[in-house]
Amino acid sequence: MIAVERSLRSETHRVPGADGFLELYQWLSCVDAGVFTKVWSDPAAYYWVRRTVQFLAAIHGAPLGTLEHAYCTEVGASGILDALRIHLGEFKRFVLAAAMISGVEAVFTEPYAATIPLALPGTNLNLAGSGRVTIRGFRQGMIDVVHDDLQVETCPTVEVGGFRLTLNPRLFNLPGLGFAGEWTLLPLEFQARHSELVAEALAAIARLQPATFSHFGEAIRAVALKPTCEGNFGSISSSELPGAFVCSVPCDSYELAATFIHEFHHNRLYFIEETGPFFELVGEDAFEGENHYSPWRDTPRPLHGLLHALYVYLPVFRFWAAAIREGGLTGARLSYAKDQLGRIPFQLQVGVNQLRRHAKFTAFGSTLFDQMASETGEAELEARALGVTLATPAMSLRAGGIFRPTTQHGDTRQLTIGETLLRHLERSDIRGECAEEKMMLAQRIRNLTVQRSDAG
C-alpha cells in the first residue's frame, strides 16, 4: 500500500481517482495498528494491491496479464486508466471495514458505488442484498448508504483448538478472479449447514497432523464451501488470493480434512514462491504450457502444476498414513484411506519423473524439488509397512460423500489400485511420456496376479 501511495504521488500521468485514494490512505494510516493489521491481512488486500500494481505498470507500457484483461471486461472499463480508476475506488471497502471495526467515522468525498453482496475485509461481515449501492461512509455507528434494503450479514465461523475459521463465499466475488459463480450468492445457511463437518475436518487435522494445523491457523483467513454439483472444480486456491480457498461439500470429514491440507499447502507454496522463481525462463512456459501427463488429472498440465501437486500430496499422504496408524477407521472409510495410501506414492513418483524429464529448475527450485523427490522415495516404503500395495482394492468417493468400490464398466469385479493407475496412464498419457512407468506398472500387476494365483 505504501508503494502504491508513493507511485501515485509521483505519477506523471493524470490518474483518475488518485486524489480520492490518497485522501483515504491518510485516514487508514492513522487508525489503530491492530485494526489496520486485521484489515490489511485479509486475502482481498493482497488482491487489491496486485491489481493496482499491474495497472500502474501497464500505464507505462507493461503488458496486462490474463487476469487484468478479465478484470477490465467484468467491470466494463474503457481502458487501463479507467480500470485503475474503478479499482482505486475499491479501496473504500477497506476503509469502510476499518471504520466499522474501530468505530471511527469515515466520510467518502466521492461516494462508494459497490456491487453487493460484498465481503468486508478483516471481518466476518458482508453487505447483503443484490445490485448496486451507494455508500457515503460510516457515521454514528452506522453505514451511511443510499439503499433502503441493505443488510449486514454475519458469516458462520468454526472454532477448533483456539483457531476460528470464517466461512465466507462472498470473499471470492472479485472481478477477474475467474472461479466465482452462482455458488457465491447462495444464502449463508449453506455454510452454516456444513459447519459441523468443517469442525470435524479441522479436529482431524489437529489430531493427526498438529504441525499443519498450527500453520493453517496462522495462514488461512477464510474458506468457502460450495455444492459439489456447482462449478467445474472440487476445490481450488489462487495465488492471487492467499489465505483463502474453496471446497466442495457434502463430503466425508476425513476427505475434507485431506482437502484442507491440500489447499493449505498450495497457499504455502505460493508464499514460498514469492521468495524467488522455481523454474528457469528457458524452453517451454512452465506456467501456461499445459503439455505434460499428470497422474492427478485427465488432461495435460504445466510443469508448475506438477510441482504444486508434489508439494501438496506429500502431506496428504502423511495425513492418511497417520489416520490408518491411529486405528480408528473402519469399513469403507478405512478402505478409502488405504486406497489413498497406496495410490499417492505411485502418483508422486510419476510426478518426480516428469519433472526430471522436462523441467529446468533454478537453484532455489532444485533445492525444493530434491527434498520432495527424497520424501517421495520414502512414501511407498511407509505404505508397504502399513500393509498397502498396488494390489490393494481400489475405493472411490462419489459426490455426496458416498464410498464405492472401483469396478470396471459393465463388470462387478473390484479393481486394484494398480489397475486404476494403469488405466489412467493408458487413457490420459496422450503423448506417451510415461511409457517406462506404464510398462513397469503393467509388469508389477502381472506379477501380483501370478502371486495371487499361486497363493490360491
Image (cartoon, rainbow, N blue to C red):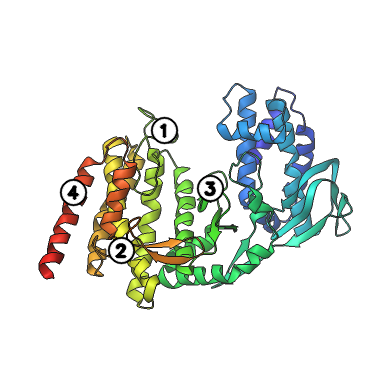
Asked where in the image residue 81 lies, by quadrant, the reply is top right
Circle 2 residues within 10 Å: few <14, some 14–19, many ≥20: some
Quadrant containing the C terminus in the rendered view: bottom left
Q: Badge 4 is on which residue? A: 440
Q: Position of residue 245 (x, y in %)?
A: 55, 54
Mark 2 vs mark 1: in front: 2
Pointer 4 or 3: first along the chain: 3
Residue identifier under label 3: 232
In primary-sequence order, the first of circles 4 and 1 is 1
Residue 418 occupies quadrant: bottom left
Query: Relative to the observer, which residue lies in front, 199 or 424?
Result: 424
**Residues at circles 2 and 1 in contact by the CB criterion of under 8 Å:** no
For residue 207, which numbered disc appears in the image?
none
Question: Helix, strand or loop at disc 3?
Answer: loop
The kind of residue on which mark 3 rests is Asn
Asked whether residue 102 is in view, the answer is no
Disc 3 or disc 2, which is closer to the eye?
2
The amino acid type, in three-letter code, at marker 1 is: Gly
Distance from the alpha carbon under mark 3 to that under mark 1: 20 Å
**Closer to the N terminus: mark 3 or mark 1?**
3
At x 73% / y 43%, what residue is drawn? 91
Q: Quadrant of residue 299?
A: top left
Q: Which residue is mark 1?
A: 289
Q: CA distance from mark 4 to mark 1?
A: 28 Å
Q: Amino acid at mark 2?
A: Gln
Discs 4/2, front: 2
On the question of residue 418 being in view, the answer is yes
